[in-house]
Amino acid sequence: RRGLAVAAGPPSTRQLREAEEAAPVFQYAGKAAKRKDRVFVWGFSYSGALGIPSFVRPDAGWKKPRRIQPTPYRLETEEKISSAACGYGFTLLASNTRDITKVWGMGLNKDSQLGFQRSRRDQTKGYEYVLEPSPIPLPLEKPQQTRVLQVSCGRAHSLVLTDSEGVFTMGNNSYGQCGRKVVEDEVYSESHLIHQLKEFDSRVVQVVCGQDHSLFRTKKGTVYACGWGADGQTGLGHYNITSVPTQLHGDIAGVNIIQVSSCGDCCLAVSDEGDVFGWGNSEYLQLASVTETTQVNVPRHLPFKIGKVKEAACGGTGNIVLTEEGNVFVWGYGILGKGPNLIETAVPEMIPPSLFGWSDFNPDTRVAHVRCGLSQFAALTNRGELFVWGKNLRGCLGTGRREDQYFPWRVTVPGEVVDVACGVDHMVSMVRSL
Amino acid sequence: LNAVPGRPPRQRIRFLPTPAPGGGGAVELVATRVPVLADHPLVRGPRFRKLKIGAGHRLDVKASGVFVLGIGHGNKLLTDLYNCHLTKVYTVDGCFGKATDDFSDTGNLVEKTTFDHITREKLERILAIIQGTNQKALLMYSNIDMKTQEAYELAVKGLIRPMGKSPPIITAVRCLQFALPEFQLEIHCLHETQQYLRKMVHEIGLELKSSAVCTRVRRIRDGVFTVDDALPRTRWNLQSIQEAIQNCQLKVETELEKTLG
């Protein structure tokens, strides 16, 4: 009898358990796995503002030019980006590093708002459209020690704030928004000129660009402005242009301002005690609570009874504030976020927190930051979610749909959103992976 | 059920001939109440021979929890409850470190991974992202025009729900317990299957750069019925069933009226 070869039956439980214990263990992430910081962009891409050249000029035969990126798309950057700003068809990215290259720019460069980008085909000319994040050469005295803190972009000019060398401005200066004297018939395209501003009463801690004006906030809480003033957005008491940063007075004289914001022709400032001050254009009822005039050229206190204000953001036609309790208030004109029926209001209206993910299940979800584009609003919650609403111009909301959004809508981003910058038709967000 | 005394037999008035008092021969008709023979239990047979029982939302073999049944005329309420699209609540237990082919701990092992880098904060972040994407799906599948004022008002109250067919949507997730390698989640969902929940546990494991299997799925709430209303195995008798039906009747009616109008 043979009986030597026994057919293998179904494995018994003991065999299964032994096989399981003997199986190799894979390790995908160690204990010290760090969360990576990434940049996501979405919106209109033909200006190059998204920084992805294959959307404008496809580099493979099967790729088609993508005019609009409707959902967040990851942008590869060499360094960790700490600050980003969106202008009108261009973007600036800045990193906190001590390396020589600290700021990258992409998008429109017809007014040298991204500095001089030497063209590779013709060494004497510069690029008019920059399709990829390209380094911006800043004339720093100590390039390996200075750090770039913040960047800001306006319609055709940009500001770069450093920690020890003041503020650098570049771009269009036809209204003095770069802080230097207006030169008649100056040609701004392919210009090498980057102006440096240092004369402030104390260190500048925040720079904000409006459409054609610039605001500087110093450590002492004073605000300086320069640029176009026909709507009173410089807040200096007149409607002329200012080509040198001048200190603002009015209701903010002596008040310690902790945040300034501007996007179009209206400006808002928040003091350390939670009061809101506004000046500039008021054609859309932004300042109608204090005055009937449509242009306010001196900062005025806005007497809102909504609680202590922590952060404010100014849009083209609407404004938004965030209070200490975490409530969000909107006023102005346009799609304000309370359904299609609320088109304009002069008094702030609260957006119910349940629209931002607050519920009985998650009672400690609150809005942490608010940002404004020209006709869009964005809110970041403390759980890292991004909500957008407003006019969906060329897909800039990032929802994946082309329709306007009348109430806050979540944007699906793979990771926790740390900061977002809104422009006219595109947005950039800084996201931390899990 | 058949042991319960049925209704008493019907009575009929018949005129029966009885012999007249005093004197024989003449027959008088006297009205008397007489039970109808057709109603006699021996003639009629048992009252209940078959019972129609319908089942509510499916619960598969490996899961446990609340399972709704409808008896007789209650089956019509079952279809109405289905059309209400109310959320169901599950407690799902999972275990990190293993990945199997059917996402539960009884399947064939596919891979083993380390899990000591996982913390509660990372898990909660993933749960927040899951909730966010499902919230969007909720609004999209509810087929309401986003541009109207009613859509805004419903969204504020949180009442937007898909009222038709839709893929599984999770309305809320919460981490109840976290003790490596095991964890427990409470999930509120719509239109789901238990295998989908197990797949979700597996995907959470993948997102955390490890792997996870689902050890237990238990439904603790199905629309208006909770674990407190449910009858355990020891109480599957007529008395408790009748009490349970009476207790739930009011709740079911109010819910149906509120949702279907």
Image (cartoon, coloured by chain):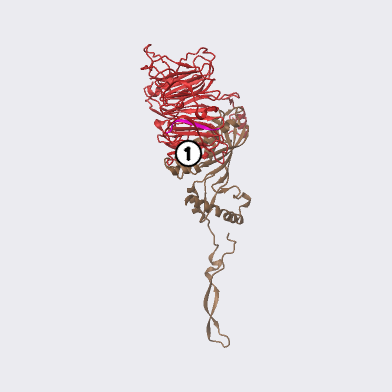
Return the residue nearer the eye: B157 or A201.
A201
Q: At which x and y percent is residue A69?
A: 41, 28
What hue does chain B carry in this figure? Answer: brown
Q: At which x and y percent is residue A93?
A: 47, 21
Name the main secondary structure of what is drawn in magenta.
strand
What hue does chain A carry in this figure? Answer: red
State whether residue A359 appears in this view.
yes
Q: At which x and y percent is residue A290?
A: 47, 36
Q: Which residues are magenta?
A: A274-282
Vertical arrangement, residue A253 with respect to residue B20, above or below: above
Residue extending furthest toward the left: A185
Image quadrant in which you'd find residue A164? top right
Q: Secondary structure at mark 1?
A: strand
Q: At which x and y percent is residue A214?
A: 46, 23
Q: Which image quarter holds the N terminus of chain A?
A: top right
Which residue is located at x 52 percent, y 51 percent? B255
As shown in the figure, which amino acid type bears the numbered disc 1?
A: Val
| Residue A271 sits inside the magenta stretch | no
State whether residue B61 appears in this view.
no
Vertical arrangement, residue B71 with respect to residue A349, above or below: below
Crowding at mark 1 (Cα within 10 Å: few <14, some 14-19, many 20+): some
Chain letter of disc 1 in the image = A
In the picture of the structure, the residue carrying the numbered disc 1 is: A347
